[in-house]
Image (cartoon, rainbow, N blue to C red):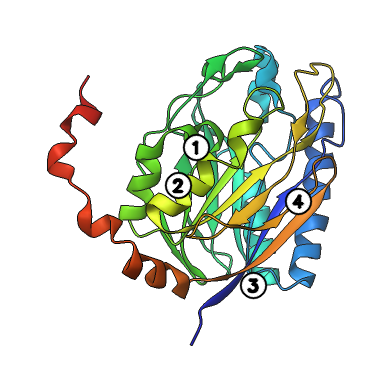
Amino acid sequence: MARIVRGGLIQAVLSEPGTSPIEKIKRSMIDKHVDLIGQAADQGVQVVCLQELFYGPYFCAEQDTRWYDMTERIPDGPTTKLMCELAKKHEMVIVVPVYEEDITGVYYNTAAVIDADGTYLGKYRKTHIPHCEPGFWEKFYFRPGNLGYPVFDTRVGKVAVYICYDRHFPEGARCLGLNGAEIVFNPSATVAGLSEYLWKLEQPAHAVANQFFVGAINRPGTEEPWNIGEFYGQSYFCNPRGQIVAEGSRTTDDIVVADMDLDMIREVRNVWQFYRDRRPDAYDGIVAG
């Protein structure tokens, strides 16, 4: 019997300019996503992932301490608690990217994973932190993640998270596969001209190399006042053969929905024996300083 899981990816245009008060931006984006999550539930979605830093702009386009006010504790902060309520209401697994405060002054780019009964399962902290032009000043805001590569046993299957810039590093994707991931979500904020040519290359490659499903989310639109480029949307699901099976709009809010047959993972791995044939004894150079 096929193990069919209906997944959803939510991409959303910023609903308030970055010059608005932080609480106004946050409230507007949370309200928008509550509605979009409800729409996903109406389509039968069983597991959904939101975009990176979903309740605000991509504020890393500048270096300004005012954005530290966007941080929340996980799981005790209001956004994680709200999403636990929504997960229980809709019987849906929800992956929630949040700007996390660990202790005062120590912040992470994090995603909380909530099971379909509203139970908080744990979190992943973004491992690889960029600091580069044009306006990706993330080391100003985030400490590198320190929780490794967890995989969460949810009602729909084994779910993992890899956040934005992480996708350029195949080592972590392999760790997620070795840890048993069946669906890996990558919530992102990336602009045209910088990495668009890689968007549909790297993550299907991760899916093929590690033989799991990938849900890649990118926000759409341009964000004022920075205008560092067009966030080009095009969120998508790809299967363990690297085939894109559903794709979203470039410019607008969208809910990307795909039915994933998790039995395909075994089928593909029985043909391509990458895990059997890998040679960890020969890879010392990968972790050399």
Callout 1: SS: helix
Q: In 3D space, how far apart are the residues under numbered discs 1 and 4 (Cα atoms)? A: 19 Å
Which comes sooner in the sequence, label 4 or label 2?
2
Q: How crowded is mark 2: few (under 14 residues within 10 Å), some or many (20 or more)?
A: many
Callout 3: SS: loop
Q: Give the number of the mark in front: 1 or 3.
A: 1
Tell me the quarter of the image containing the C terminus: top left
Front residue (pair 23, 140) = 140
- Disc 2 and disc 1 in contact, CB within 8 angstroms: yes
Which comes sooner in the sequence, label 4 or label 3?
3
Q: Residue furthest front?
A: 271
Q: In 3D space, how far apart are the residues under numbered discs 2 and 1 (Cα atoms)? A: 8 Å
User: Residue at 24% of width from left, 30% of height from top?
Assistant: 286
Residue type of the residue flagged with mark 3: Glu
Question: Residue 248, how many percent across, how many down?
Answer: 75, 51
Residue type of the residue flagged with mark 1: Arg
Q: Residue furthest left?
A: 281
- Depicted 261 relative to depicted 214: above or below: below
Q: In 3D space, how far apart are the residues under numbered discs 2 and 3 (Cα atoms)? A: 29 Å
Q: In 3D space, how far apart are the residues under numbered discs 4 and 3 (Cα atoms)? A: 24 Å
Residue 91 shows which numbered tag? 3
Which comes sooner in the sequence, label 1 or label 3?
3
User: Residue at 33% of width from left, 46% of height from top?
Assistant: 175
Residue type of the residue flagged with mark 4: Gly
Residue 167 shows which numbered tag? 1
Front residue (pair 165, 37) = 165
Q: Residue 89, located in which quarter of the rendered image?
A: bottom right
Judge whether residue 78 can be spotted in this image. no
